[in-house]
Amino acid sequence: MIAVIDYGMGNLRSVSKALELMGARVCVSSDPEVIGHAQKVILPGVGAFGQAMTELEKRKLTAPLRQFISSGGPFLGICLGLQLLFEFSKESEGVPGLALLSGDVRSFDPSQGKIPHMGWNSVDLQIQHPLLSGIKNRSYFYFVHSYYGVPRDQNTVAGICRYGSQTFAAMIAWRNIFATQFHPEKSQSAGLKLLENFTHWNGHSSITTAEAIR
């Protein structure tokens, strides 16, 4: 069973519906026990970093989420769900993130392009990974965001995207963690392929860098 975390922020229905089209059994839940006993977990998200962390804490979801990831269970973060993995964000200064990945979240330079970065953009793949099987390099995905994660260990960057003169991490991969800044559920064939790959992924990855995770 794939648990999609409900903390009041995110495209829960579109994510779960896309997974169900792939034949997956999905449960949208804010129950810490359900999250803790799931086979796979997805953290979606749309909105502000600080509010999201407040909601996760209020619903007592941070501890089971950390425990699930520490246990090696396959995890997918989507959009804000990628940013929340980091230590802190420029969007909500003073609010700690989940700190599962070393690094921070920064804002785009408004002088370099319109904010938010919205619409279709291509992604340059940086690694081979089970979730990227069958996805061509420079495939297009759908983005809506004003902030982006900057990992301390650049070897965890699975794909990069260019917006104006800025380059940012569009995908992050570390052990049993995979996260996308774009919305795979809105990204047609390439995004649905990534979600399909996730339904078959056992959480194993060949990435073995040392400084990404705390």
Image (cartoon, rainbow, N blue to C red):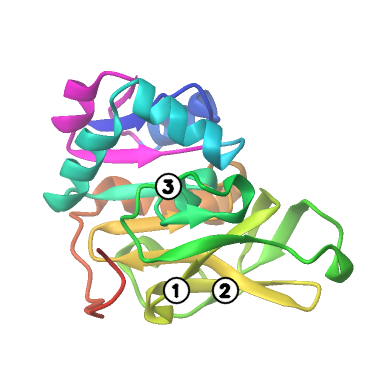
Inspect the magenta stretch and tell me whether residue 31 lies in it: yes
Determine the CA span between mark 1 and mark 3.
22 Å
Q: Which residues are magenta?
A: 23-45
In the structure shown, which secondary structural element does the residue marked by tag 3 occupy?
A: loop
Q: Which residue is at a point 44% across and 72% down the rendered structure image?
A: 158
Which quarter of the rendered picture does the N terminus lie within? top left
User: What residue type is disc 1 on?
Assistant: Val
Q: Residues within 10 Å of mark 3 (few under 14, many from 20)?
A: some
In the structure shown, which secondary structural element does the residue marked by tag 1 occupy?
A: strand
| Residue where numbered disc 1 is placed | 157
Q: Is residue 73 above or below residue 28?
A: below
Q: Which callout, 1 or 3, points at the residue further toward the start of the chain?
A: 3
CB atoms at circles 2 and 1 under 8 Å apart?
A: yes
| Residue where numbered disc 3 is placed | 96
Residue 12 appears in the figure: yes
Which quarter of the rendered picture does the C terminus lie within? bottom left
Q: Which residue is at a point 47% across and 38% down the rendered structure image?
A: 44
Determine the CA span between mark 2 and mark 1.
7 Å
In the structure shown, which secondary structural element does the residue marked by tag 2 occupy?
A: strand
Q: Which residue is at a point 38% across and 29% down the rendered structure image?
A: 56
User: What residue type is disc 2 on?
Assistant: Ile
Q: Which callout, 2 or 3, points at the residue further toward the start of the chain?
A: 3
Q: Residues within 10 Å of mark 1 (few under 14, many from 20)?
A: many
| Residue where numbered disc 2 is placed | 160
Q: Is residue 201 above or below residue 28?
A: below
Residue 134 appears in the figure: no
User: What residue type is disc 3 on?
Assistant: Pro
